[in-house]
Amino acid sequence: DVHLVESGGGLVQPGRSLRLSCAASGFIFSSYWMSWVRQAPGRGPEWVANIKSDGSEKYYVDSVKGRFTISRDNVKNSLYLQINSLRTQDTAVYYCATYSRAAGLVYWGQGTLVTVSS
Amino acid sequence: DIQMTQSPSTLSASVGDRVTITCRASQSFSFWLAWYQQKPGRAPKLLIYKASTLESGVPSRFSGSGSGTEFTLTISSLQPDDFASYYCQQYNSYPWTFGQGTKIDIK
């Protein structure tokens, strides 16, 4: 079975940094593009970033460019999201998900909550 | 950016009803559209991809159609487990975008 487990969320002050992790198992991690999607309280999902299977291509939504960095470690079967200069608008549940061009966002983790507040 | 406008935002229905949700895109694209179901406190679940392909394990009462700028999700006979929120998402071009969602509640 595919398992994606996010961690690293919490309560953070504006302007600080956070690193989210996503531990993957049950599939060949190094063969898949991966995504981060976030969902603010009471809102719909928002795509945040994608990374190619070998890490050579990365894409971001405009609102996080320059502040968020997606990365992966195919040896550790892990996906990361480095979040800098946190803003209150970044408060959301952050999900990692597998992506395939054929099928979209197929498998999702349970999410990790990031709350940005002073 | 492709904006996805989903309607209705809420829908009251009864078990056994046929339900249709529409997603309109601000730009035309072929079929790189997915539909997700989400229940409170849970991650979204993929139902339909490539506009009309049913994800493995998803009941056949769910179907998707459309291309260009108009896409629809249809539930042929609403079941108790289907009361949830539904989102469309285009993955035709970056940035990927989701519709605002449709919440189906009990009439």
Image: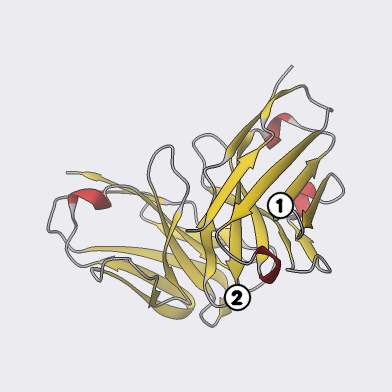
Q: Residue at x 73, y 68 (%)?
A: A53
Q: Residue at x 74, y 53 (%)?
A: A76
Mark number, residue A101: 2
Q: Position of residue A70 (x, y in %)?
A: 78, 53
Q: Nearer the viewer, residue A70 or B95?
A: A70
Q: Earlier in the sequence, mark 1 or mark 2?
A: 1
Label 1: chain? A
Pointer 1 local density, CA inside 10 Å: few below 14, some 14–19, many at least 20: some
Q: Secondary structure at mark 1?
A: strand
Q: Quadrant of the C terminus of chain B?
A: top left
Q: Is residue A63 left or right of residue B73?
A: right
Q: Position of residue B62 (x, y in %)?
A: 29, 68
Q: Residue at x 55, y 68 (%)?
A: A104
Q: Secondary structure at mark 2?
A: loop
The residue furthest left is B16
Foreground: disc 1 or disc 2? 1
Q: Amino acid at mark 1?
A: Ser
Q: Residue at x 58, y 64 (%)?
A: A27
Q: Are marks 1 and 2 on the same chain?
A: yes
The residue furthest right is A66
Which residue does the numbered mark 1 point to in the structure image? A78
Pointer 2 local density, CA inside 10 Å: few below 14, some 14–19, many at least 20: few
Q: Amino acid at mark 2?
A: Arg
What is the CA distance from the residue labelled 1 to the residue labelled 2? 20 Å
Q: Nearer the viewer, residue B70 or A87?
A: A87
Q: Position of residue B96 (x, y in %)?
A: 63, 63
